Image (cartoon, rainbow, N blue to C red):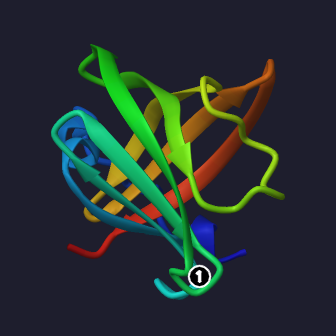
Amino acid sequence: MKAQEHFLLPDSPTKCNLIKEGKFIKEGESAKKWNIVIKKDSQREYFNNNKDYIKYKIDFLDNCMYKATVTAKTDGKYPMRIGDVVTYKVLETDHQFIKIETINYNKKEEIVLEKIE
């Protein structure tokens, strides 16, 4: 698993400010397949070769955690609905890599993002 190459010597303290603005991809995936762009108080998640997106309004709960509320989307088949809320929590950072936990419908998932811009 490629993610194990990172976080052997994580940043201390965790650099949560990395998530506050920029373009991110899931580690090991291309930016065309899936990416997130965060600017100030909004987030857009692009997928389907950048043909579709979900737009969120984000509110930081503290330096390392924010909630994102769906405000618009282009793909009617995608399971997220307008008004849905996802909570993001930064667990660790290692240079440009950020391990986050997402909580949606009481389901937790850990993913590794790479900041590319």
Assess disc 1: are there few (<14), some (14-19) or many (≥20) residues with their C-alpha within 10 Å of its C-alpha. Answer: few
In this view of the protein, which residue sits in the foreground, 29 or 71?
71
Q: Which residue is mark 1?
A: 28
Q: Quadrant of residue 28?
A: bottom right
* Amino acid carrying mark 1 in the image: Gly
Q: Position of residue 97 (x, y in %)?
A: 38, 61
- Residue drawn at the location 60% of the way across and 60% of the way down: 74
Q: Residue furthest top?
A: 61
Establish if 13 lies above or below 74: above
Q: Position of residue 75 (x, y in %)?
A: 69, 62
Q: Position of residue 49 (x, y in %)?
A: 58, 87
Q: Is residue 10 left or right of residue 89?
A: left
In this view of the protein, which residue sits in the foreground, 48 or 98?
48
Q: Is residue 77 left or right of residue 68?
A: right
Q: Is residue 63 left or right of residue 113?
A: left
Q: Is residue 59 left or right of residue 30?
A: left
In the picture, which quadrant includes the N terminus? bottom right
- Residue drawn at the location 44% of the way across and 39% of the way down: 56
- Residue drawn at the location 39% of the way across and 23% of the way down: 66
- Residue drawn at the location 16% of the way across and 39% of the way down: 40
Q: Secondary structure at mark 1?
A: loop
In the picture, which quadrant includes the C terminus? bottom left
In this view of the protein, which residue sits in the foreground, 44 or 96?
44
Establish if 117 lies above or below 14: below
Establish if 111 lies above or below 113: above
